[in-house]
Image: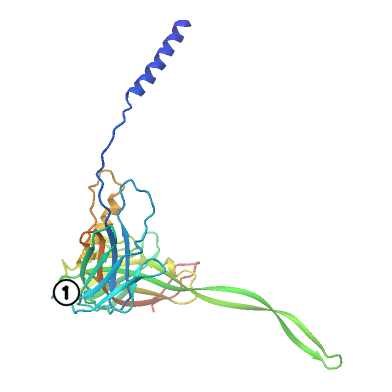
Amino acid sequence: MKKSGIYILTFILFIILLNSACEKTIEIDIDEISPMIVLNGLIEADSSVVISLTRTRHILDNAEISTLTSAFVELSDNQGNSAILTIDGSNKYVTESFSVEPGTEYIITASAEGYYDVEAVCIIPEAVAIIRIDTATVYNEWNEPLISMGIVFQDDPSTDNYYQLFMMSKSYYTEWDIVERLDTLYIDPVTDTVITAIVLDTIITRIPFYSDLYFESEDLIIEEEDNRGGVIFSDQLIQGKEYILKGNIYTYFSRGSQDTTTIYVKLHSISKDYYEYVSSLEKHYYSKNDPFATPVVVHSNIQDGLGIFGGRSTSIDSIKIAPQPYEDDIWEIY
């Protein structure tokens, strides 16, 4: 018994020594890189200009991302117009006194103490109109109804075009509130007594509800799916053609609606830099948790900084569908 105890003790000491021998402190010398301005902005025709301004962080920096609140930001165009952006309550740099028009080139500059000045250029593309929306009823393998959609548009043959398509719905839901009030029944003329009663009133409120929709499409021109449910594509395969972009959407969003639901289709014409930014960003999302994936560098057009300064114009069309009851999946297109 004594020998076996010695053997066990010797084995335990061997394991401890083996584990301690495998530990080694390695010091890694990570080069310090000067922080840079991160500028993000997407300007659109007939909309206010909103720019986000932050800074890069060291790889080991766990601090919250903070806005550069004392920067100088200026927007100008190739026509000689310019405006100084001011910071608002949400820590965004904004201006409403600058008119953004399609076909115009815009330059954004930003400077802040301790950072290199940054600059970026973009051109607002012309909007491409939605000619019509074709719809039909289809069912999936679980016999669930879907709206099959064909979005028809005419690509501009005179330039390379880049697109981003989103859909959203607007439904109405109802809230009932019961309130009490005193109601005069009659007044006794002899005693001058007022006879009252408590009456219950029902107040009905219609509340609009908005929802982003997932556009399920296997169309050949689709290049990326946006993480908000939209799709991204260029005119590489359809340049100058009238095209029908086909896909499906589910109808769950209209269940329980108290009125017809409106589906808005937004066809964004986007600048090339913004197209490359969104495409690379989606690839980055897909690959960042895959240890075997090739790292993806997110596209940026900010000179001496990071981020994106893009432009877009939008064409909107809509359809209406009847409320879908919870009891069944029957719906119809108006």
At 25% from the left and 75% from the top, the residue drawn is: 152
Quarter of the rendering occupied by the C terminus: bottom left
Q: Quarter of the image holding residue 10?
A: top left
Position in image of residue 271 (x %, y %): 21, 69
258 relative position to 238: left or right: right
Q: Quarter of the image holding residue 306?
A: bottom left
Q: Nearer the viewer, residue 203 or 74?
A: 74
At 29% from the left and 64% from the top, the residue drawn is: 40
At 33% from the left and 22% from the top, the residue drawn is: 21
Position in image of residue 287 (x %, y %): 27, 50
Q: Residue furthest bottom?
A: 189
Q: Nearer the viewer, residue 233 or 288?
A: 288
Q: Amino acid at mark 1?
A: Lys
Q: Nearer the viewer, residue 84 or 301?
A: 84
Position in image of residue 136 (x %, y %): 33, 72
Q: Nearer the viewer, residue 231 or 75?
A: 75
264 relative position to 287: left or right: right
User: Is residue 4 in sight in this rendering?
Assistant: yes
Q: Is residue 66 above or below residue 121?
A: above
User: Is residue 136 in sight in this rendering?
Assistant: no
Display coloring: rainbow
Q: Residue furthest top?
A: 2
Crowding around mark 1 (Cα neighbors within 10 Å: few <14, some 14 to 19, many 20+) is few
Q: Residue furthest right?
A: 190
6 relative position to 272: left or right: right
263 relative position to 178: left or right: left
Residue matched to label 1 = 241
Q: Residue furthest left?
A: 158
Q: Quarter of the image holding residue 222?
A: bottom left
Circle count: 1
